[in-house]
Image (cartoon, grey):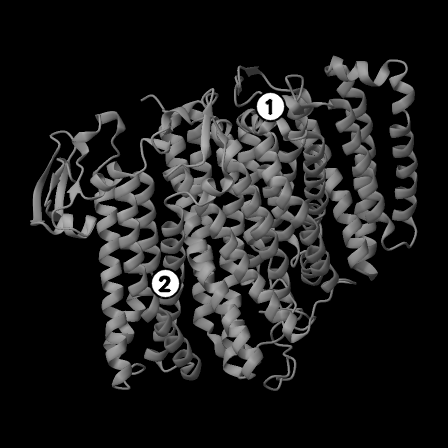
């Protein structure tokens, strides 16, 4: 079997970015949550906020460390495996990536050190500011990386000279047509993901009767946030769909498995798209609903895949199913949020066991939805790296052989399969110990090990004495 | 529009040169501390060694991202040619950095014993350093280029010279790390760091001498630059200052000075860095493309320059502040867990 460096490079990029995206999906929201907790503690002085902040900061440290190391890998992929893409697009895209480093990464890492290790070395307000800066850093990072990604989806503000892209209008490049909705949709997705993790952890404790005060605070905060953001996310998703219809109609046709252009098109709830016969098998269609949802007009026209030559069509099956997974998860989330309103009105939010069990079950859903949504938009962009202009096949480094990339793919495969399970186990252990341990634990050194064996416990600190 | 913009290449050369140097310096000392960590005996010593860099390592590694992305932004052609050419060293470096990076968080699972992650931290640091040294050696030797892309094989970068520079960099980072530990520790641990620092220093001395003699032998252009009159007279301060610094460094490793070994190691790195820069100027893809030929469009450089000139001082300020917070000898009693 001949090894194809293009296919293997694509697999490698999928592998490293799919694992990596799980970390910002969690840390962007968590950084903001920690900043809010620090702020509430700073303003109210209540112990419960301090305990929660300390607890989530431990988990944040593990996930952020994993995010840093898996993130350092990413820009180098552009050079090692996608050098032709880099050569062609650098004049336009590289400042956006550089601004991500300048505005976000330094801010995050410098203030993270203070957030993690500096509680007793700096004044309280400075510690709060450090938490805020870390949160801003994660948001700045999202801004620039999504501007970059959006430009690849809906390029604007450029001119092409000798097969390379040159900048003409920087504002048009950054605020390209799909950027605002993509930024909103993605950042809200990250917050929702974190919200369900926090709610799930709170439900886990409440069902077992542990850390009741902390858990009630967590569950209540998380569900208020989700009450706003889940409906908002559905509206943003709808706006994103309209945007895709305008700017990437082939992607939308693939998402909907729509082969023929038409008005009053049905909504295909389920089907097995068959790219060979250019038709759907076992389709379950709802008449006219497709046009209504996609164009907000029952008579609206939706273009079908047959409008494009076969070598300019994205794969159909993957975006079709990935999109349905994402939407399905979104509806499940909405159901839980609506249930929480009803329970809160009846004062049973913290005791309804079926609901708490549902929250536990829902805690990983955000990650699945992020992965599914990302798969939809990236696979739907194919066969292009820069939509309609630069083919994926023309982006790969010309010097690579299949075996080169196979070796590196195996390397990333092995290392990530060690790192991620260990990291998740570690976070699970921190959750297992819970937020209440704070004042009982011996002081630990920065890297986490006690300076003395555990048997030599210092006298118990009084609550609040660590401030 | 582009005609009216001035030539930003010299300024970007300075910025990128400084950025890469900051990386070498900052991640250099914490990779070096990681390498020396393998020689630390006893839980107490290992904890203090680790603590001395725990709050700053990810900030230091951020300079690697900035160096990579900065190269892409300012000199994209160099990025597109060099990275495929050093495919495997970069892969090995990234994987090693993954292991050593997560070790900071993962190693405390087992309190009493050395765990897998203790070894991951030490070997990860050493292997990442070695891979960076190979990249440096391959860079000095130059790359096969056709049109606008690398046309050689992915294993071309492994030569006796680049393997040698790989080992040399381990010693160099070890020296920086030892200097940092002398600065941050006291008592027996500091004496231990001085001892290791002296061994690293002797190794560095041999390596610098060997590379200085070997490089002109394999690269004719560099030989011309260093050994023809009058260049030899203009450039003679470089080896003379280096030799003087080496004497000072040796003395500071043997007397009781706290900061001098670290400062001296930095100064030696500055001189080596300058030596390489002088040898290769004005090439960014050695012997093929100059800085100007590989530069991005003036509009790209201008757009990024505005923000960089504004942000870089701010970054240096708050990075300095975060170092200031953790100033002084490392303590074992501050923490968050």
Residue A424: which numbered mark, if any? Answer: none
Instruction: Give the x, y percent position of residue B293.
Output: 62, 21
Front one among B265 and A283: A283
Quarter of the figure that contains the N terminus of chain A: top left
Q: Is residue B203 left or right of residue B47?
A: right
Q: Are marks 1 and 2 in contact (CB under 8 Å)?
A: no
Instruction: Give the x, y percent position of residue A94.
Output: 53, 37
Q: Secondary structure at mark 2?
A: helix
Instruction: Give the x, y percent position of residue A356.
Output: 29, 75
Q: Secondary structure at mark 1?
A: loop
Report the Cα–Cα distance between label 1 and label 2. 46 Å
Q: Is residue A297 left or right of residue A422?
A: left
Residue A43 visible, this angle: yes
Front one among A219 and B40: A219
User: What residue is shown with label 1?
Assistant: B157
> Residue placed at 39% from the left, 41% from the top?
A15
> Residue placed at 40% from the left, 69% from the top?
A198
Q: Give neighbour class at mark 1: few <14, some 14-19, many 20+ (Cα, 10 Å).
A: many
Instruction: Give the x, y percent position of residue B1.
Output: 57, 29
On screen, residue B65 above or below B229: below
Quarter of the figure that contains the C terminus of chain A: bottom right
Residue A61 visible, this angle: no
Chain letter for mark 1, please: B
Q: Give neighbour class at mark 2: few <14, some 14-19, many 20+ (Cα, 10 Å).
A: many
Residue A192: which numbered mark, if any? Answer: 2
> Residue placed at 60% from the left, 53% from the top?
B118
């Amino acid at each position: 079997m001949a090894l194809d460096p293009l296919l293997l490079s694509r697999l490698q990029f999928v592998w490293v970015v799919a694992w990596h995206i799980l970390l910002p999906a969690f840390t962007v929201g968590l950084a903001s949550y920690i900043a809010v907790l620090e702020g509430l503690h700073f303003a109210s002085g209540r112990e419960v906020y301090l305990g929660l902040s300390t607890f989530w900061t431990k988990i944040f440290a593990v996930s952020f460390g994993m995010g840093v190391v898996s993130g350092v890998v990413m820009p180098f992929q552009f050079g090692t495996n996608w050098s032709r893409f880099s050569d062609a697009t650098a004049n336009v895209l590289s400042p956006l990536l550089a601004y991500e480093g300048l505005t976000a990464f330094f801010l995050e890492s410098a203030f993270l050190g203070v957030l993690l290790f500096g509680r007793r070395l700096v004044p309280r307000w400075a510690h709060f500011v450090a938490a805020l800066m870390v949160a801003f850093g994660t948001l700045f990072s999202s801004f620039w990386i999504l501007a970059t990604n959006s430009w690849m989806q809906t390029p604007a503000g450029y001119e092409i000279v000798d097969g390379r892209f040159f900048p003409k209008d920087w504002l048009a490049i950054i605020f390209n047509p799909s950027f605002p909705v993509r930024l909103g949709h993605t950042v809200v997705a990250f917050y929702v993901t974190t919200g369900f993790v926090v709610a799930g952890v709170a439900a886990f404790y409440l069902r077992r009767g542990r850390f009741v005060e902390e858990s009630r605070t967590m569950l209540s905060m998380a569900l208020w946030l989700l009450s706003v953001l889940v409906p908002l996310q559905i509206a943003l998703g709808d706006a994103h769909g309209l945007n895709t219809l305008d700017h990437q109609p082939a992607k939308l046709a693939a998402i909907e498995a729509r082969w023929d252009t038409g008005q009053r098109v049905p909504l295909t709830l389920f089907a097995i798209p068959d790219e060979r016969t250019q038709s759907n098998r076992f389709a379950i269609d709802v008449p006219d609903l497709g046009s209504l949802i996609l164009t907000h007009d029952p008579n609206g026209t939706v273009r079908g895949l047959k409008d494009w030559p076969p070598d300019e069509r994205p794969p159909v099956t993957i975006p079709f199913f990935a999109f349905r997974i994402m939407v399905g998860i979104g509806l499940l989330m909405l159901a839980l949020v609506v249930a929480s309103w009803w329970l809160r009105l009846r004062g049973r939010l913290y005791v309804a066991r079926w609901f708490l069990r549902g929250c536990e079950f829902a805690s990983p859903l955000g990650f699945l939805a992020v992965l599914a949504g990302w798969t939809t938009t990236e696979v739907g962009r194919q066969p292009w790296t820069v939509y309609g202009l630069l083919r994926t096949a023309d982006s790969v480094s010309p010097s690579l052989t299949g075996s080169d990339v196979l070796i590196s793919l195996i390397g990333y495969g092995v290392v990530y399969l060690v790192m991620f399970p260990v990291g998740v186990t570690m976070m699970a252990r921190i959750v297992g110990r819970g937020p209440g341990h704070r004042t009982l634990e011996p002081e630990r050194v920065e890297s986490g090990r006690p300076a003395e064996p555990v048997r030599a416990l210092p006298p118990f600190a009084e609550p609040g004495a660590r401030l | 529009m582009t005609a009216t913009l001035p030539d930003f290449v010299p300024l970007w050369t300075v910025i990128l040169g400084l950025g890469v140097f900051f990386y070498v310096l900052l991640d250099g000392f914490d990779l070096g501390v990681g390498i020396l960590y393998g020689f630390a005996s006893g839980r107490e010593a290992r904890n203090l060694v680790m603590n001395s860099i725990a709050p700053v390592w990810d900030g230091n590694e951020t300079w690697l991202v900035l160096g990579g992305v900065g190269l892409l932004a300012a000199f994209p052609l160099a990025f597109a040619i060099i990275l495929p050419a050093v495919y495997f060293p970069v892969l090995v470096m990234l994987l090693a950095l993954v292991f050593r990076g997560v070790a900071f968080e993962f190693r405390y699972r087992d309190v009493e014993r050395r765990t897998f992650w203790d070894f991951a931290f030490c070997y990860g640091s050493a292997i990442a350093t070695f891979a960076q040294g190979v990249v440096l050696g391959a860079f000095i030797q130059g790359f096969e280029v056709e049109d606008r892309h690398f046309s050689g094989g992915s294993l071309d970068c492994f030569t006796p010279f680049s393997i040698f520079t790989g080992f040399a960099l381990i010693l160099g980072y070890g020296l920086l790390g030892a200097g940092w530990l002398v600065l941050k520790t006291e008592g027996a641990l500091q004496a231990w760091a001085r001892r290791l620092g002296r061994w690293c220093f002797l190794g560095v001395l041999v390596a610098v001498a060997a590379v200085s003699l070997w490089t002109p032998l394999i690269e004719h252009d560099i030989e011309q630059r260093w050994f023809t009159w009058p260049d030899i007279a203009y450039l003679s301060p470089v080896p003379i200052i280096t030799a003087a610094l080496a004497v000072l460094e040796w003395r500071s490793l043997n007397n009781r000075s706290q900061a001098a070994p670290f400062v001296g190691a930095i100064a030696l790195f500055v001189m080596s860095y300058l030596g390489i820069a002088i040898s290769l100027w004005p090439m960014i893809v050695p012997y093929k493309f100059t800085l100007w030929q590989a530069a991005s469009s003036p509009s790209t450089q201008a757009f990024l320059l505005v923000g960089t000139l504004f942000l870089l001082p701010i970054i240096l300020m708050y990075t300095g502040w975060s170092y200031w917070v953790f100033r002084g000898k490392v303590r074992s009693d501050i923490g968050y867990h």
